[in-house]
Image (cartoon, helix red, strand yellow):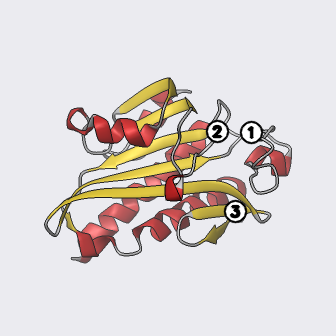
Amino acid sequence: MNIEKIKNAKTKYIGKNIEYFEEIDSTQEEAKRNIKKYDNGTIIIADKQIKGKGTHGRIWYTNLDNIAMTIIIKPKLKVKQLEGFTTSIAKNIQMAIKDLYNLDLEIKLPNDLLLNDKKICGILTEITTIKEKVKEIFIGIGFNVNEKNFPIEVLKIATSLSKETNKNYDREDIICKIIENLEEEIEKIKNLN
């Protein structure tokens, strides 16, 4: 993983600090358990997750060829401003893949993206609050990029960019585009109120 390339994304704060792990239990859990040491916009990223989290407590399988990351945002927002936020993230990921590779991902509400009717990306958004104010947002993104061999239990329901197109993709390019789109989205939400 080329961390410097990600740090050079066209963002003001997202991805300027990156905590990289070759292997971790879960980027989401790492972000939450050590939140005090991480700045706004920090990305926790791992090549391999052994207890990655999906929705409803499901395991999200990740190996070296995919993206497993959690983006930490410490916004000055009210809870109600985040209505539909996970869907907005999905739209921004959809747009990133369209812009980069001219591929059309389908959004399966509220938090999955599909390619050829198979899951390619999952989003897990968790927040901590103080009364009506959002203290932290943890945006977990699992994206199957160059994965060729899926475990038997997900073979029929999961896919990757590489599996569908027989090409290899640059994970860093995808991350850069996602975080650029995401930062723009967060600024839009702030400016609405």
Q: For residue 187, what is the image quadrant?
A: bottom left
Task: Say what secondary structure mark 3 lies in.
Answer: strand
Which disc is residue 114 wearing? 3
x and y, in percent, of residue 52 in the image: 53, 41
**Amino acid, disc 3:** Leu
Q: Amino acid at mark 1?
A: Glu
Name the residue that disc number 1 marks: 147
Q: Is residue 2 visible?
A: yes
Q: Quadrant of residue 86?
A: bottom left
Name the one closer to the observer, 74 or 102: 74
Along the polypeptide, which appears first: circle 2 or circle 1? 2
**Circle 2 — which element?**
loop
Question: From what the image shows, is residue 61 above or below residue 127?
Answer: above
Q: What is the crowding at mark 2: few (fewer than 14 residues within 10 Å), some, or many (at least 20)?
A: many
Q: Are marks 1 and 3 in contact (CB under 8 Å)?
A: no
- Taking the view exactly as shown, the residue that stands out farthest to the right is 166
At label 3, counting other C-alpha atoms closer than 10 Å, the crowd grade (few under 14, some 14-19, many 20 or more) is many
Q: Residues within 10 Å of mark 1 (few under 14, many from 20)?
A: some
Q: Are discs 2 and 1 less than 8 Å apart at CB?
A: yes
Q: Which residue is mark 2?
A: 66
Element under label 1? loop
Q: Does 114 sit above or below residue 120?
A: below
Residue 158's spot in the image, x, y percent? 74, 53
Q: Real-space Cα distance between discs 1 and 3?
A: 15 Å
Q: Could you tell whether 138 is left or right of 141 in the image? A: left
